[in-house]
Image (cartoon, grey):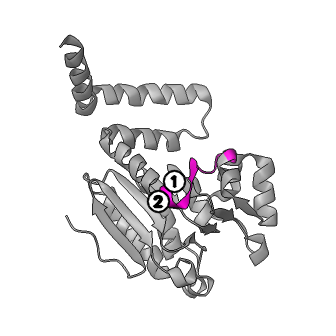
Amino acid sequence: MSLPTLCSQIGADFSRGQLRLTLNREAQKNALSLAMYQSLTDALRWAAGQGDVRVVRLCGSGDSFTAGNDLADFLSAGELNESHPAVQFMRAVRELPQPLVAEVNGLAVGIGTTLLLHCDLVYASEDSYFQLPFTRLGLCPEFGASTLLAKRIGHVKARELLLLGDKLEALEAERLGLVNGVYPLERLAEEVDWVCAELGKLPPQAVARTKALLGEVEAWPTDRVIERELAVFAECLRGDEAKQVISQLMNKGNA
């Protein structure tokens, strides 16, 4: 089992069930180049097919998560269609079966914030901030932010952030529900280490089914969600993973 060859701007390390991907372009605040998008896509698609990968962790090097797109490089790819590296990356994120955990240090601008709406868990340092400056660039939201941000933090604040493009500080992002936790920078990696280790201990099929279910039924009426949950629950009960865990628990109770 070996990782695909990635560009020098993406660091990759696989250990103890965790694939850690690091944006490594410090001088440009980890602005995403086409090569970085392609390498991230390759790494995520590789991880999706590896049973030993239990969690994928995304972080930035230096003092930034990412400043968003390298605009000059982004525009050089031509038409924004399914073959564009950024679109391929979005697809790979959406299709990843394992939990995707973001470790945000410093600035998270543009897709650096919209990406977080597709992560399963997000943790940030106290000095982090989030910004969606699309209108300031003559652009509009991407990666589903037009609907997902409002669902996450409410319509009032979402409109403010998307229309004005103002910064959102880390503690306010936590209060609104954009991130799961905020820590001093020196503790951030340690806290994310713990979260990833805990995810890695859980039955992987159950985690994958839960993640898929959350995405599948997000906009469904409650009665339909309950019906779908029961169907998936029954499938899980019939699976080897649940049978093994339940058997172990029953044996402990009879000991």
Q: Position of residue 127 (x, y in %)?
A: 63, 63
Residue type at mark 1: give it. Answer: Cys
Q: In which quadrant will I find the N terminus?
A: bottom left
Q: Is residue 125 left or right of residue 190?
A: right
**Where's the C terminus, which quadrant?**
top left
View extreme (top): residue: 254
Estimate the spatial distance between the alpha carbons at disc 2 and disc 1, rounded to whole Å: 8 Å
Q: Is residue 186 above or below residue 199?
A: below
Q: Residues in magenta?
A: 175-188
Q: Tag 2's secondary structure? A: helix
The residue singled out by tag 1 in the image is: 119
- Pointer 1 local density, CA inside 10 Å: few below 14, some 14–19, many at least 20: some
Q: How many C-alpha atoms fall within 10 Å of the one at disc 2: few (<14), some, or many (≥20)?
A: many
Q: Residue at x 43, y 80 (%)?
A: 9
Specify whether residue 47 is in view. Answer: yes
From the image, tell me which residue sits under label 2.
93
